[in-house]
Image (spheres, rainbow, N blue to C red):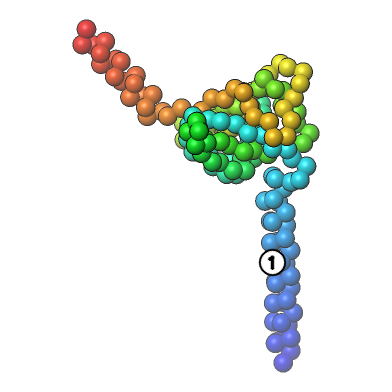
Amino acid sequence: MRGQVTETIVGLAVLILAGLFVNYAMKTVNSGGSGADYHLKAHFGSIGSIDSGSDIRLAGVKVGVVNNISLDTKTYDALVDMSIHANIPVPVDSTAKITTDGLLGSAYISIEPGAEEDNLAAGDSFDYTQGAVDLLTLLGQVAGQSSKKSEN
C-alpha cells in the first residue's frame, strides 16, 4: 500500500513537471512572433532554402523571424512576410539579402541597413532585395566559361 502511494505521488510530480516544461517550451517558441513585433514584406526572385521560422539578422544578430512565404502570381516572385522586433528600426533604403552560414549552413535573411533617416513602418516592403544564389548553377557557369576559354 505504501509503495502505491509513493508511486502515485512521484507520477503526479512527473506530470506536473512535464506540464511546466511544455508551458515553458510553448512560450519560448512563440516569443519570436510576439505582439510587440512589426511585419515587413520583401519580394525575392529566389528564396533558396528559406522557410517559415528562418532567422532575420542584422549585423549577425537575430532581430526577427520569417512568418510566411507565398507566391506573388503577378510577378512570380516569392513574397516573404517577416516579423521584426519592435525596438529595431530599419531604414527605408535597407537591403534584404538571402544568405547562408558557410557552404552547408542554414539560410537566413540578412538586413543591410541603409543611411536614410526614415524607417520602414509596419506593413511596408523592402525596395531592395537580393535573392538566393544557386551554388551549383554558379559553378556550372564557371566551368562552362573555363571550357570555352580552353577551346580558343
Q: Is residue 102 visible?
A: no
Near-viewer residue (144 or 11): 144
Work out whether residue 36 can be spotted: yes
Residue 91 at x, y percent in the picture: 72, 23
Residue 113 x, y percent position in the rendering: 68, 22
Residue 136 on image: x %, y %? 37, 29
Q: Residue furthest bottom?
A: 1
Q: Is residue 11 above or below residue 85?
A: below
Q: Residue at 58% of width from left, 40% of height from top?
A: 54
Q: Quadrant of residue 101?
A: top right
Q: Compared to 48, does 1 lie above or below? A: below
Which residue is depicted at the point 62% across and 38% down?
81
Q: Secondary structure at mark 1?
A: helix
Farthest left residue in view: 151
Residue that extends furthest to the front in the rendered view of this protein = 74
Q: Is residue 18 left or right of residue 54?
A: right
Residue 28 pos. (x, y %): 71, 51
Report the residue at 23% width, 11% height from top.
150
Q: Is residue 127 above or below residue 4?
A: above
Q: Residue at x 71, y 66 (%)?
A: 19
Could you say which is closer to the camera, residue 75 or residue 120?
75
- Residue 10 falls in image quadrant: bottom right
The quadrant of the rendering that contains the C terminus is top left
Q: Which residue is mark 1?
A: 18
CA neighbours of label 1 inside 10 A, class few (<14), some (14 to 19), many (20+): few
Check the picture and name the quadrant holding the N terminus: bottom right
Q: Compared with residue 116, is residue 124 higher up or lower down, i.e. above or below?
A: below
Residue nearest the viewer, comparing 11 with 109: 109
Q: How many marks?
A: 1
Three-letter amino acid code at the position of disc 1: Ala
Left or right, 90 with reference to 147: right
Please name whichever residue, 136 or 41, is drawn nearer the observer in this view of the structure: 41
